[in-house]
Amino acid sequence: MDTAVRFPTTPKAIRARALKLSPRMSVEKAFQAIVRNCLDQIEANESGVIKYHDVESLHQMRVGLRRLRSALGMFDEVLSLPVALRQELDWLVSQLGPARDWDVLAGSTLPRITNTLDADAPLVRVQHAAADKAMALHAAAGAAIASERYQNLIGNLERWFDERGWRAMQLPADKVKLKMRIGDFARGILEKDQQRLLKRGRKLKGADPEARHRVRIAAKKTRYAAEFFASLYPRKTVRPYVKALASLQDELGLMNDVSVADGLLRQLSDGDEQLKDGTGFLRGYLASHSRQGDGKLRKLWKRFVPMRAPG
């Protein structure tokens, strides 16, 4: 039985537009292009989240938000977002994250298991309970995006962006860095991200979920940086690098989904005695299969290690 969250009419979720940077751009101009690209992705998915509680629209808004936070982190050494805006972005993350976690459980993790098994009553009850939880959290996320707090956040971000609010907070040395060509800056970011990922990845063998999560976050940031700066380098150099990162990130993401699923299933069983048998079985099944991805992950990691960051 398909228990994925669906609605009668859904809009087309909006992915990030292709980003074109010029090697002649200053660091500041490149920052503006990247942030504009992220904000456009976030704002383009508002309707899908508010009106339709659409799974993919929420996912793409969340991706845009993650990309924005990653971009702000990349440029943090030369400009900085005001603390109040950073805190509001953290709030927005907290409004979208839970719905996405339950979407993955209800629409992906549980169907992958039950499609290989007989859908007996305890498992069906768990699937329906997970889908109900996802729908409730979508409603909450939609309310958050429709709220005055969200509108104020976007308005203040747009104002800070349009007025180049970072200039008021800068030291003279930072202003000089903003006038640099983007090439040298991008190369430094990509090399730093690569080294951070390689350092964390050395502990992948036998890693616990928390350590794998740290590697996944590093892979995600490295991929975002490579995608942001992709137009500065030959396609034949960038494409294999991004593809290897995406494969690594996807496999780590699947393993993280299993870890998150265990916690969510525990929440379901704590709230409803009738779900204990189904959730207990599913948690045991996930635990027994949690190591199956290790071999594939090691292969993907070995394939990535010798690769060099574009530059």
Image (spheres, rainbow, N blue to C red):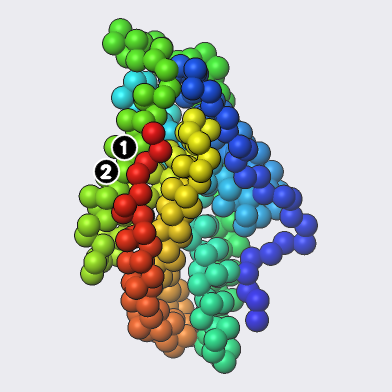
Name the residue nearer the viewer: 134 or 24.
Answer: 24
User: In the orientation shown, which residue stands out farthest toward the top?
Assistant: 172
**For mark 2, what is the residue?**
195
Q: In this orientation, does residue 92 appear?
A: no
Q: Residue at x 63, y 50 (%)?
A: 57
Question: Is the Cβ of the residue at disc 2 closer than 8 Å to that at disc 1?
Answer: yes
Residue 280 image-quadrant placement: bottom left
Q: Quadrant of the N terminus?
A: bottom right
Asked if 161 appears above or below 117 in the picture, the reply is above
Asked if 128 appears above or below 217 in the picture, the reply is below
How far across and down, in percent of the image, does residue 187 sit? 36, 31
Q: Residue at x 61, y 33 (%)?
A: 40
Q: Residue at x 43, y 54 (%)?
A: 244
Q: Amino acid at mark 2?
A: Gln
Asked if 230 appears above or below 139 in the picture, the reply is above
Q: Quadrant of the C terminus?
A: top left
**For mark 1, what is the residue?**
191
Name the residue nearer the viewer: 274 or 156.
Answer: 156
How far across and down, in percent of the image, does residue 200 sit? 25, 52
Q: Residues within 10 Å of mark 2 (few under 14, many from 20)?
A: some
Q: Amino acid at mark 1?
A: Glu
Q: Which mark is residue 65?
A: none
